[in-house]
Image (spheres, rainbow, N blue to C red):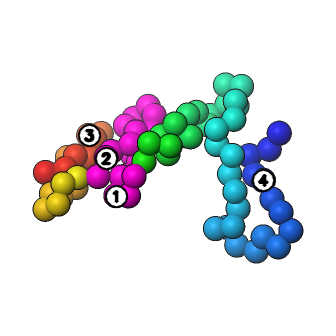
Amino acid sequence: MSLFVTAKGVTTLSQIEIDADKDWDAKEISNIGSIVADMTHGDIVYYNGSTLVRLPAGSPGHNLQCLGPGKNPRWS
């Protein structure tokens, strides 16, 4: 089993298909598919110190705010 599924004619990184929903037997990739499955236009993903987290898109007129090192981003 490999992370990358390749095919003839793939010439750029954007053409590579990554299967992130498989069982990785305790390897470092975990539940990326579940984060991406719920995403909509405008969502972002950030690292909260232990895992990847989806931050839903903010309301119109709100800005993404960084609260400094070690803090999670938020909409303000």
Point 28% across, 41% down: residue:
72
Q: Amino acid at mark 4?
A: Val
Residue 73 appears in the figure: yes
Q: Identity of the amino acid at label 3?
A: Lys
Q: Position of residue 73 (x, y in %)?
A: 26, 46
Task: Give me the C-alpha separation between circle 4 and circle 3.
Answer: 36 Å
Question: Which residue is labeled 3 in the image?
Answer: 71
* Residue where numbered disc 4 is placed: 5
Label 1 is placed on what type of residue? Answer: Gly
Position above or below: 9 against 72: below
| Mark 2–mark 1 CB contact (< 8 Å) | yes
Secondary structure of the residue carrying numbered label 4: strand
Q: Which residues are magenta?
A: 40-57
Amino acid marked by disc 2 = Pro
Give the residue at mark 1.
42
Q: Earlier in the sequence, mark 2 or mark 1?
A: 1
